[in-house]
Amino acid sequence: MWLKPNRALSRRGLRCLIGGLAALALTTAGLGAWQGNVFAPLFALVESSAVAFALGIAWRAGDRSERITLDESSLEVRFLPGRRCMRFQPYWVRVQFGLDNGRLDHPRRRLLLRSHGRVLEIGAFLADEERAELSRKLMVLLADLNGQSRR
């Protein structure tokens, strides 16, 4: 399975959005300069650069993903980009889907893999419904692999 966050804009769409916002800011700054505010274009350039930088960082956060591989000998979770990887023995791994007790103001449900004292959260960037579906799917796959009856 390959888990990726939902992304609303393509790279081209992001460039168009940034260009449109910069054009609006510079047009407004041009009108301000025409009326006597000579610093308006400078502030518009700084503001447009800061907005483009922030949107770029937010867009790049959508590049992260998790690849889950399950076979008879291991359950492997690889975090991309990067080289972080965790392996579990499929017979001993338990899937836990429940509320995060640490956040009382906005509780969210976490999907955890547990085995031999190790805990790994997966799908943190997914919506609650997507995490619930993923937990059901993982439980079914693990039960089928281990020859257990489904709960």
Image: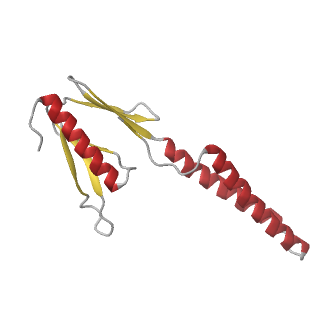
Residue depicted at x 27% and y 61%: 102
Position of residue 35 in the picture relative to residue 26 (left or right): right
Q: Position of residue 126 (x, y in %)?
A: 38, 50
42 or 7: nearer the eye? Answer: 7
Residue 1 sits above or below residue 97 on the image? above
Residue 7 sits above or below residue 145 on the image? below
- Residue 42 sits in which quadrant? bottom right
- Residue 119 sits in which quadrant? top left
The N terminus sits in image quarter = top left
Residue depicted at x 64% and y 52%: 53
34 or 6: nearer the eye? Answer: 6
Residue depicted at x 65% and y 58%: 51
Q: Position of residue 133 (x, y in %)?
A: 28, 48
**Number of disc labels:** 0
Residue depicted at x 46% and y 41%: 64
Q: Position of residue 85 (x, y in %)?
A: 34, 31
